[in-house]
Image (spheres, grey):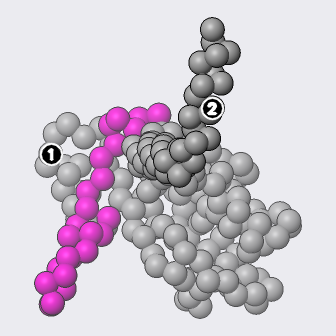
Amino acid sequence: MFNHHFKFLLRRLWRQQLHTASHLIGLTLGIAVCLCIGLFLHHELSFDTHHEKADRIYRMNQVWESASGEKSLNYTAPGALAEALRSEVAGFKEVTSVYPRNEKMLETENKERFMQEGILFVEANFLDVFDVKTVRGNAREALQQPWQTLLTASTAKKILGTADPIGKTLKLDNKNTLTVAGIIEDFPDNTH
């Protein structure tokens, strides 16, 4: 019985090839679009969920408005805001500031230069809020000292190669000398 129905279906689909092809193409495109939307939503909704305290981490943003009226979102806030939140607002267990820097020039001891994006200046308590895995060195100790830097594993490999990076110095925009004090794991793609 099943064999008979299957043969009937195949004969009918074969006679109406254009109709069958348009249905199959529509079904395939519909499934593909649904899968893409699902993957996009999963990626967007999983941002920063790798942190243990992700449900308790909030980010303060600042909206900048240009003279032409164009608004842009910036994840920096005035420096005094963190201190004001610590001292004047109850309910915060930890407050940390992050100061992003746009693309900057890094120069190694060998006078090699690299343009580096994603440079962050952070307060010492940054590691109390965010989960950062250390590969080498002592990240907490490094953030206690001025002009100490932590590099991600991929950045260390790009800039310093396979040599031991701990203790090497980098010059930031030909002004400040940074000492590499530790290597941390690369952040996932779905992190701010």
Dividing the picture into quadrants, the one containing residue 98 is bottom left
Query: Which residue is found at the position 57% from the left and 48% from the top?
Result: 17
| Image-based side of 107 in relation to 90, left or right | right
Nearest the viewer among 40 and 148 is 40
At x 67%, y 15%, the residue is 3
Quadrant location of residue 34?
A: top left
Q: Nearer the viewer, residue 58 or 2?
A: 2
- 56 to 141, vertically: above or below: above
* Label 2 Cα neighbours within 10 Å, binned few <14 / some 14-19 / many ≥20: few
Query: Residues in magenta?
Result: 52-75
The stretch drawn in magenta includes residue 74: yes
- Label 1 secondary element: loop
**Whether residue 145 is visible:** yes
Q: Specify the quadrant that holds the C terminus.
A: bottom left
Circle 2 is placed at which residue position?
10
Query: Where residue 62 is drawn, which disc sits there?
Result: none
Element carrying mark 2: helix
Q: Nearer the viewer, mark 2 or mark 1?
A: 2
Tell me if mark 1 has few (under 14), some (14-19) or many (20+) residues whose alpha carbon lies within 10 angstroms of its own: few
Which circle's residue, 2 or 1, is located before the other in the chain?
2
* Residue type for callout 2: Leu
Amino acid beneath label 1: Val
Q: Quadrant of residue 113?
A: bottom right
Q: Quadrant of the N terminus?
A: top right
Task: Read off the residue under disc 1.
Answer: 89
